[in-house]
Image (spheres, helix red, strand yellow):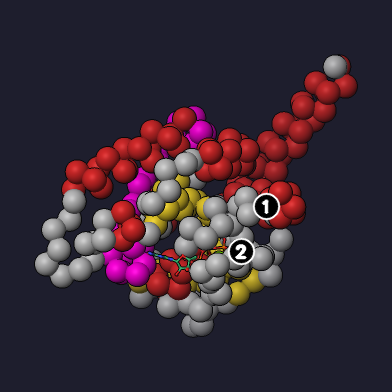
Amino acid sequence: MQKSNARTRWEKSGTAWRKWHARSARKSAHLLGGAPTVVFLGKRGVGKSSTLNALFGLTLRSDAAKECTTRPEAVQVRVAPRRRLRVVDMPGIAANLQTAERYRRSYEYWMARADVVVWLTQADVRSYTQDQKFFRSYGPFLASDVQVVVAVSKFDTQDPGVGLAGAVLDEALHAEKLRDVREQLAPYVPPGKSIRLVPYSVVRRWNLGRLVAALTPKAAQGPAPQNMPRTPETEVTP
Ligand SMILES: Nc1nc2c(ncn2[C@@H]2O[C@H](COP(=O)(O)OP(=O)(O)OP(=O)(O)O)[C@@H](O)[C@H]2O)c(=O)[nH]1
Ligand SMILES: [Mg+2]
């Protein structure tokens, strides 16, 4: 019993140290003009890679049938003439028990380095257990100043009219869905952290502008830096 308490204390202090270390690294990266890091997370197949492709004209692999992204891919993208972000496409969580454990280190690594976490949950699913478990397990790796965006993907499956010219949007349905998502996730997001919800659809290209606008962290919304690399860069990471 005593041993397990000691172990828990050790694990907690390890988490605190990693968070402190990652926060210092983020601060120095910002001082050096580094791009803020935006990490895309969510269950398998919610549309992380497709969303990044649609938002930034990338060519990340996506798949309609089986688990697809197998390692994190970090890419520098331009969101305005002198504004760039480092977006990270993550392997989805909970495809099966083996991969859930294998990707643990990647989630910890990137949660600790994120300036903004974009959590995708898809509009046509009303079960949130895995989403809740994720925030409960990895929420402690989020620094206090990290912003959380909950992107409600595939909204066309919920309201087939979204994005179609002349279609009447079902505002009551949108509000009901967003209220449900917020109520289900809010208790599991670390205390004191607010979440911003953005519904959107890649296939209808609906609300993509609002999603991009939600990605720039408040701390980086001042004057744009002067020196920027000309081409997207990719990185190999855990
Ligand atoms: N109906 C609909 N389907 C979408 C939308 N966005 C993505 N999809 C589909 O969702 C499926 C999965 O997309 P991916 O981008 O591979 O999902 P992912 O979250 O990256 O999956 P993993 O890498 O396995 O974690 C593909 O068939 C996409 O075409 C959308 O807005 N609406
Ligand atoms: Mg993917």
Q: Which amino acid does label 2 sit on?
A: Glu
Q: Distance between the residues labelled 1 and 2?
A: 10 Å
- Residue shown at the point (23%, 66%) measured from the top left: 163
Q: Position of residue 230 (x, y in %)?
A: 49, 82
Q: Where is residue 210 in the image (x, y as percent from the top left)?
A: 30, 59
| The magenta segment | 188-213
Q: Which amino acid does label 1 sit on?
A: Asn
- Residue shown at the point (80%, 21%) measured from the top left: 5
Residue extending furthest right? 3
Label drawn at residue 186: none
Q: Can you tell me whether the CB of the residue at mark 2 lies under 8 Å from the nearest atom of ligand 1? A: yes
- For residue 80, which quarter of the picture? bottom left
Assess disc 1: are there few (<14), some (14-19) or many (≥20) residues with their C-alpha within 10 Å of its C-alpha.
Answer: few
Label drawn at residue 67: 2
Q: What element carries label 2?
A: loop
Viewer-nearest residue: 26 or 8: 8
User: Which badge, 1 or 2, is on the more N-terminal residue?
Assistant: 2
Along the horizontal axis of the image, is 19 left or right of 52?
right
Specify whether residue 119 is in view: yes
Residue corresponding to mark 1: 96
Q: Do the residues labelled 1 and 2 touch (CB within 8 Å)?
A: yes
